[in-house]
Image (cartoon, rainbow, N blue to C red):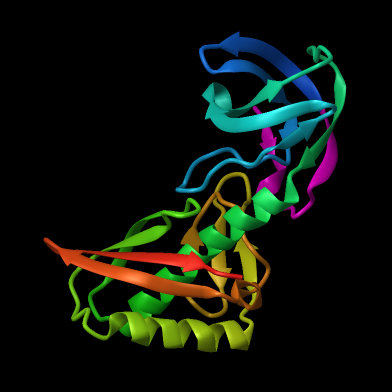
Amino acid sequence: MTTKLYLNSYNLEGNSTITATGTDDKGKWVILDETLFHAQGGGQKSDIGLINDASVISVIHAEKDQVKHYIVEENLLKTGDQVHMIVDEENRMTNAKLHTAGHFISALVEESCVGIRAIGGHHWPGESRVEFEGTSDIEDLISTINKEINQKINDNLGIKIEGDPQKSRKIKIGNYTSVPCGGTHLKSTGELVGLRVTKVKSKKGRLRMSYEINE
């Protein structure tokens, strides 16, 4: 098992121990006893960075609740090594903002539109969107939600982690309903300046809302 420190820590640097190494069709990987690197999933891309001087290029969930860190290394890393982790801050913040924005938009839409329920999200740069179950009059929906976004950004709502981070983690934005999530997030909505909904599409009882953040 890999303890996923990113589930309850905002730290971008720390120490760990390599518990296994290997190579597969995706490349060379190492497993750590605990990690600050977010593993890809939940609609969010993985962290990147460094383990010692080895570049971490991808991170994924693996069997037995472990996390594989795919690396490009100059000096050999081996099982038992004590290593230092550095998560790339720019990449982390980009992904944390987009993931937080997805939950934020979901909360606002569910509050504004009766019978609409968020069912999924994709929070990758350049293709971020949230999907909802239900239908709504979409004619003025973009302008309505963007007004709400700007207001709640100005309100600087706090974002906190609830539950057991490793087993039953939830994210709560302001007074909105807590939702299960294993991604990385901001500390408040005030950090979402530049967020806006760009497109809404309604089809066959589903609503898709695309968004971006322009800083």
139 on left or right of 23: left
Q: Quadrant of residue 38?
A: top right
- For the residue pair 64 and 10, the one nearer the viewer reads as 10
Q: Quadrant of residue 156?
A: bottom right
Quarter of the image that includes the C terminus:
bottom right
Quarter of the image that includes the N terminus:
top right
Decide if residue 178 is in sight here.
Answer: no
Decide if residue 134 is in sight here.
Answer: yes
- Residue at left offset 49%, top offset 77%: 176
- Residue 107 part of the magenta segment: no
**Position of 11 relative to 4 (above/below):** below
Residue 192: x and y in percent read: 59, 73
- Residue at left offset 46%, top offset 64%: 102
29 on left or right of 178: right
- Residue at left offset 73%, top offset 26%: 32
Q: Residue furthest left?
A: 204
Residue 138: x and y in percent read: 22, 79
Residue 162: x and y in percent read: 61, 62
- Residue 15 part of the magenta segment: yes
Residue 120: x and y in percent read: 35, 55
- Residue at left offset 81%, top offset 16%: 74
User: Magenta stretch?
Assistant: 1-16
**Count of number-bearing discs:** 0
Q: Quadrant of residue 208?
A: bottom left
- For the residue pair 101 and 74, the one nearer the viewer reads as 74
